[in-house]
Image (tube, rainbow, N blue to C red):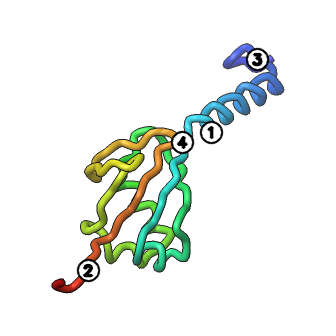
Amino acid sequence: MGRATGQSAPLRLVAAKIDLVSAMRATLQTKVRLFARLAELTGTRETAVEFAEGLTAGQAFALLAGRYPHLNDYEGSVMFAVNAEYVPPEYILQQDDELALIPPVSGGAGAL
């Protein structure tokens, strides 16, 4: 038996594995949809972000910009939508949310 915990080494190892599995379950995931120029820059229209509780939409964008550095050019101008509703960058994401990143757009039809 281990002196500090009263558990044998194999039991401590099992307890450590259980703690690791619990920690892994605490990781959340959200689907991210990219539109227009953001999709072109990343080469995908959809990806996923794994995160710990408390991550905001703006922080999720920063994580993606770490993967795709060209996204940094759009920091401060991207609009965020979660589950088809516009949200501020401070919006806290939940498990299974769908985050949409929408870059600024311009143009449109000319005068009729």
Residue pictured at 61% horizontal, 35% vertical:
25
Look at mark 1 in the image and give the residue it sits on.
Answer: 24
Evaluate if marks 1 and 3 touch, with contact meaning CB atoms under 8 Å apart: no
Which residue is located at x 68 percent, y 34 percent? Answer: 21
User: Does dot 3 land on a helix, a strand or a loop?
Assistant: loop
* Residue type beneath disc 1: Met
Name above or below for residue 26 compared with residue 90.
Answer: above
Residue farthest to the top?
Answer: 6
Q: Position of residue 19 (x, y in %)?
A: 65, 30
Marks 1 and 3, the one that precedes in the sequence: 3
Q: Inspect the image, locate mark 2, and give the three-letter code of the amino acid beneath it.
A: Gly
Residue 54 in picture, x, y percent from top left: 39, 40
Label 3, on which residue?
A: 7
Which one is in front, 48 or 17? 48
The quadrant of the rendering that contains the C terminus is: bottom left
Q: Nearer the viewer, residue 11 or 66?
A: 66
Element under disc 2:
loop
Mark positioned earlier in the residue sequence (2 or 3): 3
Q: Quadrant of the N terminus?
A: top right
Element on which disc 1 rests: helix
Location of residue 96 in the rendering, given as x and y in whole percent from the top left corner: 52, 42
The Cα–Cα distance between marks 1 and 3, rounded to whole angstroms, is 24 Å
Q: In the rendered structure, which amino acid carries the disc numbered 3?
A: Gln
Residue 28: which numbered mark, if any?
4
